[in-house]
Image (tube, grey):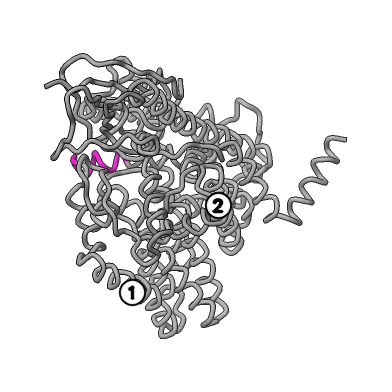
Amino acid sequence: MNGRFWTILSKWTNSHPKFVLTLCVCIALGPFLAKPFNMDDPLFIWAAQQIHAHPFNPFGFDVNWYGTPQPMWNVTENPPLASYYIAGAAGILGWNEIALHVAFLLPAIALILGTYELARRLCPRPFLAALLTLFTPVFMVSSTTVMCDVLMVAFWVWAVVFWIKGTEEDASWLLAVSGALIGFAALTKYFGIALIPLLALYSGVSKRRFVTPALCLCIPVLMLGGWLVSAHKLYNHNIFLQAANYAGHESNGGSIATKCTIAFAFMGGCLAPVNFFTPWLWWSRSGMPREGQPRNLLAPWLWRPRTYLAVIRGALLLGLALVYAGSLLRTYDRIQSQANTLVEIQVVFWAIGGLTALFLAGMDLWKGRRDPHSWLLSFWVFGTFVFTAVLNWTINGRSILPMAPAIAILLVRRLQKMNVQQNPSTMAPLRLALPLAAGAVLAFFVARSDFFLAKAVRQTALKTHEAFGRGGQKLWVEGHWGYQFYMAKLGDPAFDMKHPAVHTGDFLAVPLNNNDTERPDTPGTDLVTQGPRYLTDMNENVGASFYSSVFAPLPFAFGDVPPEKVIVWPVRP
């Protein structure tokens, strides 16, 4: 009975893959629809509120984000299309958390369906590639925000789909649609403009006529140029160069080796299913029995001397990696001393996954040097990695997200090649289901920890206001992200470090798990709220910082997570 049920379910899934994927996205993200706004969500929401009042002036207001009021165009590093989307959705559904998260289900669904459509052309198991993208921590966490990243990658993936289809069918209108989608991606996040050289490379390797593609690639240039010209007229400032300069001048320090190591750890963690498939990838290459050979546990290859030599080399390399990770962690002085060893192990573990992801791209390009699809996927990954590790101001999960669909497709392509060449059982359903399920469980719990963190931040804001914001004195707030957003909604303003307007008897609230804060030396009152306990994606003390490697070297970390704490000081003469 069970076998028949699974057979029917498999056939129905194969007949309706897009419906099943849409249902999977809704089930995966449904528990987080009530997630409070946190991190950079407020910047996009405030811009959307400005758009509601002044549709043609999205950044024409001041915001105190770095300790003193500044023009919004000088604070944000992204174009406004995501905020226009929020403004339109809020006009229909409302401004509350559930309404906006429901609106952002659409880009998430579009990204997964776009990955499936792209994978149909590039690998044998498109449904698996789409699930691998869905069940990555970077997709799950990013899809529970109202920031621009998932929307940009959705435009990105569909632009690639239309470009490949237009190239193969020699259809100019499909290339034009792709050009428009590239423009929308660039107007959502400036990184979207990287599609222009990537797709130009694909067209060049494809050796098709290049005049029409070149003209279609001018469409996003004109779209982005139109926004930059209008922004310059509005704000008398080149905000694209400002974003580029910020990425360069604010880049976190350290050598290239250090940045790459942290980038590997972020890649491995954000794209965790790759780590769980790693034994399948390396097992076969190290001598897994081929068809016709014994398949018992004590297979002949276990007794070969080179197997033991490989294990010894691996142990030595692992020891060296742990030593290097320990030296790397000394640059993060806020990681708790008792957590250092655990963080070192996690850095090494996830860095192996990051290296494996780059290995997938390199091997696919090496084996398919004349295949335009290999060039497309490999440079998609390499380009995103270089931007994340070297060019961007910080290494974060949001920068890793664009490579998730490409890595998923590359992984499926690699598994298929191993299946054909070496071991027919490699693609057996159980072998695929186990690492996929492990990735799904981890991705869910990482998103859950981010959800609990946002709830704790909102709760600390409510506690602070209840305790100190209801008297005759004023309550001032340092820091930003979700804490500033909810305190502002309660009527408690951000503290201006350059021009303080405080009076004796006022109060100053400072959240510890935050940024751009200065704490007085005198004792204050502690307000504590328990957030995530054993897994978190944002706490320096345990080495986790999904949103910026400036604070910690991992996108998420296991450990004893301290609660969210706010300290409130009375203002004295």
From what the image shows, is residue 445 above or below residue 428?
above
**In terms of secondary structure, where does tag 2 sit?**
helix
Q: Residue type at mark 2: give it.
A: Ala
Q: Which mark is residue 226?
A: 1
SS type, badge 1 = helix
Find residue 316 and name its label. Answer: none
Quadrant where the C terminus sits is top left
Residue behind mark 2: 103
At x 33% / y 36%, what residue is drawn? Answer: 484
Q: Nearer the viewer, residue 123 or 336?
A: 336
Quadrant of the image occupied by residue 194: bottom left
- Point out residue 37 in the picture as x, y percentages from the top left corner: 44, 40
Q: What segment is highlighted magenta in the picture?
A: 253-262
Residue at horizontal 25 percent and vertical 27 percent from the top: 329
Is any atom of residue 560 visible in this view?
Answer: yes
Relative side of 500 to 341, left or right: left
- For marks 1 and 2 on the same chain, the one whose residue lies earlier in the sequence: 2
Within 10 Å of disc 1 (Cα), the crowding (few <14, some 14-19, many 20+) is few
**Dots 1, 2 in contact, CB < 8 A:** no
